[in-house]
């Protein structure tokens, strides 16, 4: 990495020295190097500057908006799948609990299960009274 940076520094120094010597030659002789191509290069660089200043930020903004919508839709789908998975897991658990806590035929369910059933009926009917013991 150090060798790369040293070589890059050397190339930069040679380039700057070349530019300064060309500029000194132009000033001392009064002649311009590549005088006919300078207006074309200036026009090209001006249009490139406009593209970088105006068009590139608009493209980046559009791309960011596009990917934001895609990621947001993916997150929504992921949350929906997680909710469905949790619902399926809860239904399986409830089904398992129904079979393991149901009373055998002919027997009454336990006192706790009767209280839970009464509380559930009260909540479904919209009654405000909850069954809590102090």
Image (cartoon, rainbow, N blue to C red):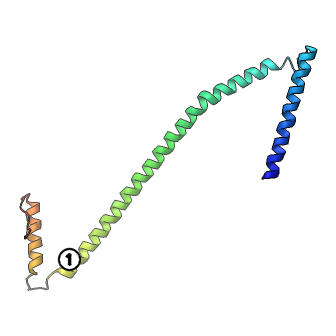
Report the residue that reaches farthest toward the right.
29
Please determine whether, in this image, residue 59 is positioned above or below residue 77.
above
* Residue drawn at 84 percent across, 37 percent down: 13
Above or below, 18 against 96 in this view is above
Task: Name the foreground residue: 4 vs 109.
Answer: 4
Q: Is residue 62 rendered to the left or right of residue 80? A: right
Residue 117 lies, with reference to residue 47, above or below; the image says: below
Q: Quadrant of residue 16?
A: top right
Q: Residue at x 37, y 61 (%)?
A: 82
Q: Quadrant of the C terminus?
A: bottom left
Left or right of 105: which side holds 87?
right
| Extreme residue toward the top, this view | 30
Of 100 and 130, nearer the camera is 130
- Image location of residue 23, percent across then percent down: 87, 22
Q: How many marks?
A: 1
- Left or right: where does residue 75 sit relative to residue 7? left
Which image quadrant for residue 57? top right
Q: Dot 1, how many residues are within 10 Å of its Cα: few (below 14), some (14-19), or many (20+)?
A: few
Q: Position of residue 54 (x, y in %)?
A: 59, 27
**Helix, strand or loop under label 1:** helix
Residue 104 x/y as whole percent:
14, 85
Q: Residue at x 53, y 36 (%)?
A: 61
- On the image, numbered disc 1 is attached to which residue? 98
């Amino acid at each position: 990495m150090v060798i790369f940076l040293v070589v890059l520094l050397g190339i930069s120094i040679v380039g700057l020295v070349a530019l300064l010597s060309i500029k000194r030659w132009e000033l001392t002789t009064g002649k311009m190097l590549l005088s006919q191509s300078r207006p074309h290069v200036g026009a090209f660089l001006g249009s490139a500057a406009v593209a970088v200043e105006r068009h590139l930020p608009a493209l980046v903004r559009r791309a960011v908006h596009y990917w934001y919508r895609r990621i947001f839709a993916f997150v929504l789908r992921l949350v929906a799948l997680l909710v469905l998975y949790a619902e399926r897991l809860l239904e399986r658990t409830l089904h398992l609990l129904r079979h393991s806590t149901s009373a055998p035929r002919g027997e009454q369910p336990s006192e706790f299960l009767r209280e839970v059933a009464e509380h559930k009926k009260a909540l479904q009917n919209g009654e405000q009274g909850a069954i809590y013991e102090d």
